Image (cartoon, rainbow, N blue to C red):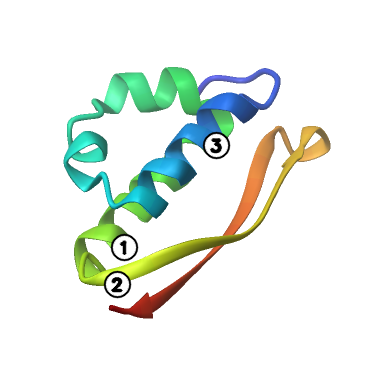
């Protein structure tokens, strides 16, 4: 696991890919690139990818995102609704 500052631009790129439904793009992200770019939050990204596999027929909307330097990660809430 990488430690360091929150990579807000990468977090937002990830959220934008979810909202746009770019699951194929996300599916091609390697474990190593997620760990390197996602830092401490990288492990959680793997959970999100599993969730996206289950919810691929749902529309997504970012409700909240905030980088939290004290936790060395970004926090997001995404709402999923049936298409």
- Crowding at label 2, few (<14), some or many (≥20) Cα neighbours within 10 Å? some
Q: Residue at x 57, y 32 (%)?
A: 40
Q: Residue at x 64, y 29 (%)?
A: 8
Viewport quadrant of the C terminus: bottom left
Q: Residue at x 49, y 28 (%)?
A: 38
Which of the 4 image quarters holds residue 58?
bottom left
Which mark is first along the chain, 3 or 1?
3
Q: Residue at x 22, y 68 (%)?
A: 54
Q: Relative to the observer, which residue lies in front, 51 or 72?
A: 51
Mark 2 residue element: strand
Which of the 4 image quarters holds residue 24?
top left
In the image, residue 30 above or below residue 42: above
The residue wearing badge 3 is: 12
Residue 68: where, in percent of width, then height? 77, 40
Residue 16: where, in percent of width, then height? 45, 43
The residue wearing badge 2 is: 58
Residue 15: where, in percent of width, then height? 48, 45
The residue wearing badge 1 is: 51
Which mark is first along the chain, 2 or 1?
1
- Crowding at label 1, few (<14), some or many (≥20) Cα neighbours within 10 Å? few
The answer to whether marks 2 and 3 mark residues whose Cβ atoms lie closer than 8 Å is no
User: How far apart are the alpha carbons under marks 2 and 3?
Assistant: 19 Å
Q: Which mark is residue 18?
A: none
Mark 1 residue element: helix
């Amino acid at each position: 696991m990488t430690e360091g500052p929150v990579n807000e631009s990468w977090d937002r790129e990830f959220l934008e890919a979810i909202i746009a439904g770019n699951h194929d793009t996300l599916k091609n992200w390697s474990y190593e690139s997620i760990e390197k770019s996602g830092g401490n939050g990288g492990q959680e990204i793997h959970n999100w990818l599993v969730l996206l596999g289950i919810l691929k027929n749902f529309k997504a909307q970012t409700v909240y995102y905030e980088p939290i330097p004290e936790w060395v990660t970004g926090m997001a809430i995404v709402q999923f609704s049936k298409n």
